[in-house]
Image: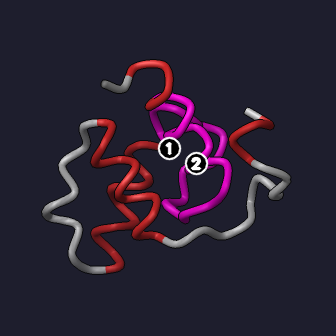
Amino acid sequence: MQHYLAGRAPNAPVAADALLAALSDYGYDVSGATTPRQQQRLIAAFQMHFRPADYRGLPDAETLAIAEALLEKYGD
């Protein structure tokens, strides 16, 4: 996981669009996440599954790192 964090603190904010792009690449349907609230709900759903310790739906470095790790392991 440290590799994907790239020196960032796990709770460091990341751009929501970068995280949503990674979630889309992983297979999540992000087409309905057009408002900040909808984006937060989608991110929270991912976090509930892959990081249940914190699923507030905030786009952070740890969530993006998890998505990137999953894409490397299971992506095309």
Instruction: Determine contact: label 2, label 1, CB under 8 Å.
Output: yes
Q: Looking at the picture, does residue 23 appear above or below residue 51?
A: below
Say which amino acid is labelled 2.
Answer: Thr
- Tell me the residue at 28%/69% (across/down): 38
Tell me how many marks there are: 2
Q: Residue furthest front?
A: 76
Is 56 covered by the magenta stretch? yes
Say which amino acid is labelled 1.
Answer: Gln
- Quadrant occupied by the N terminus: top right
Nearest the camera: 56 or 64? 64
- Tell me the residue at 21%/75% (across/down): 34
On the image, the x and y values in percent for residue 63 come to 58, 48
SS at circle 1: helix
- Quadrant occupied by the C terminus: top left
Per the image, the residue denoted by label 1 is: 47
Looking at the rendering, the stretch of residues picked out in magenta corresponds to 48-70
Q: Residue furthest top?
A: 73
Q: Looking at the picture, does residue 72 appear above or below residue 27?
A: above
Assess disc 2: are there few (<14), some (14-19) or many (≥20) residues with their C-alpha within 10 Å of its C-alpha: many
Nearest-to-viewer mark from 2 and 1: 2
On the image, the x and y values in percent for residue 61 come to 66, 56
Nearest the camera: 33 or 76? 76
Is 36 covered by the magenta stretch? no
Tell me, what colour scheme is on the image?
secondary structure
Per the image, the residue denoted by label 2 is: 63
Nearest the camera: 22 or 50? 22
- Tell me the residue at 35%/57% (across/down): 21
SS at circle 2: helix
On the image, the x and y values in percent for residue 35 come to 26, 80
- Tell me the residue at 47%/39% (across/down): 48
